Image (cartoon, rainbow, N blue to C red):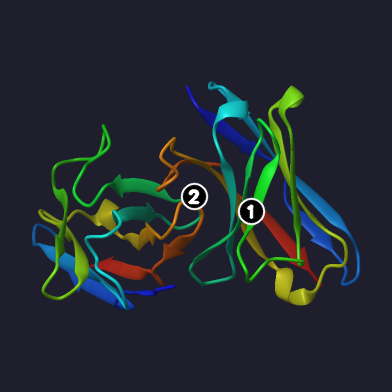
Amino acid sequence: NFMLTQPHSVSGSPGKTVTISCTRSSGSIASNSVQWYQQRPGSAPTTVIYENNQRPSGVPDRFSGSIDSSSNSASLTISGLKTEDEADYFCQSYHSSIHWVFGGGTKLTVL
Amino acid sequence: EVQLVQSGAEVKKPGESLEISCKGSGYSFSNYWIGWVRQMPGKGLEWMGVIYPGDSDTRYSPSFQGQVTISADKSISTAYVQWNSLKASDTAIYYCARLTTATTRFDYWGQGTLVTVS
């Protein structure tokens, strides 16, 4: 098994860019795809990035995802920050076909 | 439109039993795995277990094995999670979520069911 570690919180000003990291503890980050979920207060999670860098329809292109094998981590980048982006963000991956792993979540504050 | 609609909030006492539900619509319920995910107050997401309604194949996270029972009734497109004896530490929001056909991620989520044990 592996763990996914995220920073507890990040912040940014409207219009700026923030990046949230998700580091895999063992095994290669490239072995299994990484997803990112956004959870606004009082709401269920929704997908903003899937399969490392794919955006579902309806998610603005201000959201982008990537993986970096050198740091064994995935990243979610949000550019042109808006107040509506303020939320918790969770990364998620899996190993084998029946075991899913979530990161601990990162609270994004838009100052 | 794919929808997962969960049953309403519950307030229970320690030691009581409980079953909450998740009704799927807008897709072939039998042919997609459904998972249950726990979110304790102010905390992150934890997968509890998954079920394939087509044949009721069920898998549990080691952390939840023996603590809950997951079931499904494909005739009414509904999945369930059941507790026999609730503890205060079961207080959480419980989400059902559909897995993609590749089972790598959760693509649709229910609105969540708040369970309070006190």
Residue nearest the viewer, comparing A39 with B82: B82
Is residue A72 shown to the viewer in this render? yes
According to the image, label 1 marks what residue? B59
Coordinates of residue A37 in the picture (x, y in percent): 36, 53
Disc 1: which chain? B
Is B110 positioned to the left or the right of B22 in the image? Answer: left
Say which amino acid is labelled 1.
Arg
According to the image, label 2 marks what residue? A44
Coordinates of residue A92 in the picture (x, y in percent): 37, 59
How busy is the neighbourhood of tag 2: few (under 14 within 10 Å), some, or many (20 plus)? some
Give me the disc on residue A9: none
- Dot 2 and dot 1 residues touching (CB under 8 Å): no
The secondary structure type at the circle numbered 1 is strand
Cα separation, mark 2 vs mark 1, equals 23 Å
Q: Write the residue at 48% across / 68% down.
A: B44
Identify the image quadrant of residue A76.
Answer: bottom left
Q: Write the residue at 49% across / 59% down.
A: A99
Q: Is residue A70 above or below residue B4?
A: below
Q: Write the residue at 60% across / 27% down.
A: B29
In the rendered view of the protein, which quadrant contains the N terminus of chain A?
bottom left
Is B79 positioned to the left or the right of B25 in the image? Answer: right
Coordinates of residue B1 in the picture (x, y in percent): 47, 22
